[in-house]
Image (tube, grey):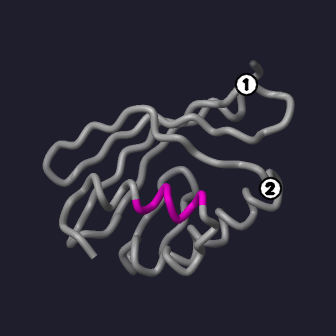
Amino acid sequence: MTNDPQATARRMYEAFNARDYTATQEIFTEDFYSHPLDATGPSSVAQAWKRFHQAFPAVRVVVEDMIIERDRVATRTSVHGIPGRKPPTMMEIFAIRDGRIAELWGLSSLDRDN
């Protein structure tokens, strides 16, 4: 585990792309809260990742921009591997506590027509 917010955020995207669901236990705090999912805990993240990977087996997230300020990380990512669409964009903000992601806010263009 690292206290570097950028490394923590990058580790999360690497785990998502590698389909490393067990890594959520190391990346997210036990009381992690996702505002978009209205869900708590690392297991909620692993379940959401599994559902997304089942729906889109070739999906991968590419970090386009990352901004760090103290314990906050803001990212703009593109989501590749969704058939019939140009890569949707996601904007996420993470609160980092003790080297782990404690809270997440996000917006996505996945629900919009291209």
Q: Secondary structure under badge 1?
A: loop
Residue occupied by mark 2: 57
Residue occupied by mark 1: 86
**Could you tell which of marks 2 and 1 lies nearer the N-terminus?**
2
Q: What x and y, as percent, mark residue 78?
A: 57, 34
Instruction: Name the residue located 22 percent from the left edge and 43 percent from the top edge.
Output: 68
Is 53 left, or right, of 67 in this rendering?
A: right
Q: What x and y, as percent, mark residue 106?
A: 48, 43
Is 90 left, or right, of 95 in this rendering?
A: right
Q: Nearer the viewer, residue 60 or 24?
A: 60
Q: Nearer the viewer, residue 77 or 70?
A: 77
Instruction: Name the residue located 40 percent from the left edge and 71 percent from the top edge.
Output: 28
Residue 66 shown in magenta: no
Q: Secondary structure under badge 2?
A: loop
What range of the chain is rendered magenta?
A: 11-17
What amino acid is labelled 1 in the image? Lys
- Name above or below for residue 26 compared with residue 36: below
Instruction: Name the residue located 64 percent from the left edge and 67 percent from the top edge.
Output: 19
